[in-house]
Image: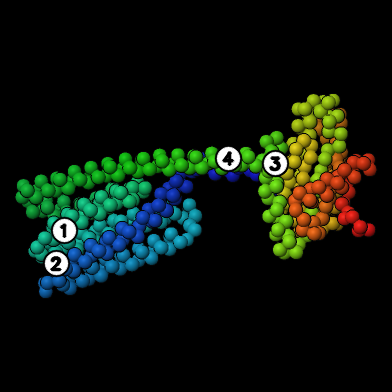
Amino acid sequence: MHILHKEKGTTEHYSDIHIYAECVRVVYQNRIPSLLSVLIVSVIPLVVGLHEKTRTVVLILVSILWGYLFLNSFLCIRFNRSKISDQDTVKWGIHFYIQHCLLALLLDSIFLYLQINRVEGSLLYLIMVSLGFSAGSVSAFHQLKWAPPIFITSSMIPQIIYFLSLQSKSNIVVAAMLTITIIFMSIISMKQHKNWIRTLALSFELQVAKNEAERIARIDILTGIYNRRAFYEMAPKYIAAAKRSNRPLSVVMLDIDHFKSINDTYGHAVGDIVLVSIANMIKHEIRESDIVGRLGGEEFVILLPDSDRDGAFKIVERLRQKVQSMNFPGYDFNVTSSFGIVLNTAHESIDRLLKNADSALYDAKNRGRNQTIVYEQPGID
């Protein structure tokens, strides 16, 4: 049964897990350029560290780094090409934190190894690489709150320990400066993350408002079923599908008998109760594949895919009897209704089908109301 409705947690607001999932997705979208830059940087130790003393270990460490790049590129491509649920993105976020930490430790291991073995310029390269990738992490991955701080800390703590181990004033100053850098860049990252979340939440709120506006524009405010506009948008698609698959399709028009007298006698508020009650009954009785809409006033329309003449007639007769047996507590009256059915044998337009269904409905009213009439094509016995 096709009716518009709100899904809990989607039209009212976006949950924290949805926001977190979006952050993870953005981070993985930004991941490939970062990995390419690491690949470029991996050339440096090969250029400066292929001395006889360090060659073997450098090749092993760089090979591990390349293995890291290959694996994470594969995971990144897999994530970006897959439709991963919001719940499953949680573990991918955790994986990213681990990846980020391992990358920092791998880079430190390579350049500190070269420094310990007195390869000229290794420490300078390490500091430049650490600062460059730390800034890049803040810029590209601040969507995940702890990703940049984890990388910055994992990258610079081993360097701080190394400088402190040298026990000289100048090296202690460098260690202090690296500590300040960790704090400063982490604060910047946190602020950027906060701004990002605020912007993302606002974007989601605007999308929710847009979706809600579109939903409201497609429903009848009183009854909660599709309005004329929505029905006219959807019906041609069902007609085309029925034509492609050569399946039957029926259109039904329903009119409440003597509805004006109900409004005149009991008031429009009671008339609204009747309309809402009948709309709710139809929604409950028809199939999931069917469409119900209100064309205006007391007129309703129902589209029944895969329903031939007999099938549509059985459904409509059940609805007619349901209407006739309805009670309205506090009011001493009953309601009847008239139905007109048209079978889409010639795959006609929705306008033509509604015109023919209305003709059958008009015939039902002329024959005394509270009955169902199937439209007969002219010239067909």
At a point 27% along the width and 64% down the height, the residue shown is 39
Q: Do residues under tags 2 and 1 come within 8 Å of each other at their CB atoms?
A: yes
The amino acid pointed to by label 1 is: Tyr
N-term mark: 4 or 3: 4
- Answer yes or no: is residue 225 visible: no
Q: In the rendered image, which residue does mark 1 sit on?
A: 125
N-term mark: 3 or 2: 2
Spatial CA distance of label 1 from label 4 is: 54 Å
At a point 63% along the width and 39% down the height, the residue shown is 217
Badge number at residue 227 = 3
Q: Nearer the viewer, mark 4 or mark 3?
A: 3
Badge number at residue 225 = none
The amino acid pointed to by label 3 is: Asn
The amino acid pointed to by label 4 is: Glu
Report the label total: 4
Res 162 → quadrant: bottom left
Spatial CA distance of label 3 from label 2 is: 73 Å
Nearer the observer, 56 or 4: 4
Query: Which quadrant of the figure contains the C terminus?
Result: bottom right
Q: Do residues under tags 3 and 2 come within 8 Å of each other at their CB atoms?
A: no
Q: Nearer the viewer, mark 3 or mark 1?
A: 3
Mark 1 neighbour class, 10 Å CA radius: few under 14, some 14 to 19, many 20 or more: some
Spatial CA distance of label 4 from label 3 is: 15 Å
